[in-house]
């Protein structure tokens, strides 16, 4: 008897994100997961045939390969499946819906109705989550000179970085992308609502997964010279009722470690403030493999397949 369950194919299931998505989908009995044997995973005809059989294809590929795979699926005409791209290739493409359901009211519905969805990057999820509500509320001007600092577990850096850190004596901490050309900057600027390109300084620590994204602010340089409580209240109101995003009070010891949300699809936002010096730091904490990658992909997939009604 034919199954009425929606079917999914992961193109690139052997990578870090693909493996994470596969593990989550294997625990979802309401979804049929289809796969190719390893010998056929690079076979164009075999990939095209399985794409024609399923309801949705997740692209877990390098950018150029993701564009090629999207074109391959597009050539199927009426048999084209819905597409969810986990790469950077289509995140600022106006023909693709950005897959951050909590980004603004109605975004989850747009994702549910979309044929093509681009999964967000891990760093942008934290940065956009912090900045966009404050821009929309007028507390941060669109042309404000934003700086974003972030640290991630090494699992987000691809095979070369993972291999380097898995070796004994791997680097304890590294700043990288100091040419200020990190590929996540365009989507961060676009979806945070900024007209001025932000400065983004990422780093990687010698831990496998987990992430902190921070945005420092001079409060007296902002319109209306808001207090830290004003920033917190805007964020709390914006995300009220969200299942996966929470605005939390600052830690009492004024410290945060990056691994607390590992293996979840949660995003925690907080505001640290020193009113004496009129300075604040916005902080996002998430799992770079969860809400920053595989977890977010499965959240979007469930919306696209009609298995969940909202974010």
Image (cartoon, helix red, strand yellow):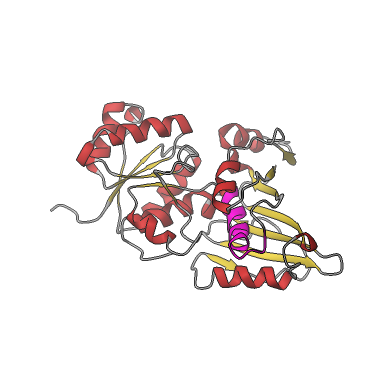
Determine whether 133 is above or below 155 in the image: below
Residue 77 falls within the magenta-colored stretch: no
Tell which of 290 and 71 is nearer to you: 71
Say which residue appears at 36% left-offset and 64% top-offset: 308
Residue 27 visible to an observer of this rendering: no
Residue sitting at 60 percent across and 37 percent down? 162
Predominant SS of the magenta segment = helix
- In the visual, does 124 lie left or right of 12? right
Q: Nearer the viewer, residue 244 or 97?
A: 97
- Kindly identify the residue that appears in the image at 32 percent across and 26 percent down: 43
Q: Which region of the structure is painted magenta?
A: 123-140
Quadrant assignment, res 108: bottom left
Q: Position of residue 188 (x, y in %)?
A: 58, 47
Lateral position of residue 34 relative to residue 126, left or right = left
Question: x%, y% of residue 257?
Answer: 70, 58
Q: Can I make out residue 12 in this image?
A: yes
Task: Give the residue displayed 86% in from the left and 69% down from the top.
Answer: 276
Name the quadrant of the C terminus: bottom left
Q: Position of residue 182 (x, y in %)?
A: 63, 37
């Amino acid at each position: 008897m034919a199954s009425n369950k929606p079917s999914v194919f992961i193109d690139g299931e052997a990578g870090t994100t693909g493996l994470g998505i596969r593990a989550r989908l294997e625990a979802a009995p309401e979804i049929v997961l289809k796969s190719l044997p390893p010998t056929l995973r690079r076979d164009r005809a075999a990939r095209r045939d399985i794409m024609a059989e399923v309801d949705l294809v997740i692209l877990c590929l390098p950018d150029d390969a993701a564009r090629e795979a999207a074109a391959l699926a597009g050539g199927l005409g009426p048999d084209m499946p819905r597409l969810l791209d986990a790469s950077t290739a289509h995140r600022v493409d106006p023909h693709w819906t950005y897959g951050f359901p909590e980004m603004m009211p109605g975004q989850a519905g747009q994702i549910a109705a979309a044929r093509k969805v681009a999964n967000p990057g891990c760093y942008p999820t934290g940065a956009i989550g912090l900045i966009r509500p404050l821009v929309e509320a007028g507390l941060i001007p669109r042309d404000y000179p934003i700086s974003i600092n972030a640290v991630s577990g090494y699992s987000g850096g691809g095979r070369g970085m993972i291999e380097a850190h898995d070796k004994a004596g791997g680097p304890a901490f590294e700043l990288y992308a100091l040419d200020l050309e990190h590929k996540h900057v365009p989507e961060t600027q676009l979806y945070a609502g900024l007209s001025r390109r932000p400065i983004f300084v990422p780093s990687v620590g010698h831990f496998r997964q987990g992430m902190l994204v921070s945005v420092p602010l001079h409060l007296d340089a902002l319109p209306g010279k808001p207090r830290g409580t004003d920033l917190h209240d805007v964020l709390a109101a914006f995300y009220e009722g969200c299942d996966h995003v929470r605005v939390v009070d600052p830690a009492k010891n004024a410290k945060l470690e990056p691994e607390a949300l590992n293996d979840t699809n949660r995003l925690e936002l907080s505001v640290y403030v020193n009113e004496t010096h009129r300075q604040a730091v916005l902080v996002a904490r998430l799992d770079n493999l969860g809400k920053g990658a595989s977890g977010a992909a499965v959240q979007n997939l469930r919306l696209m397949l009609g298995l969940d009604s909202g974010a």
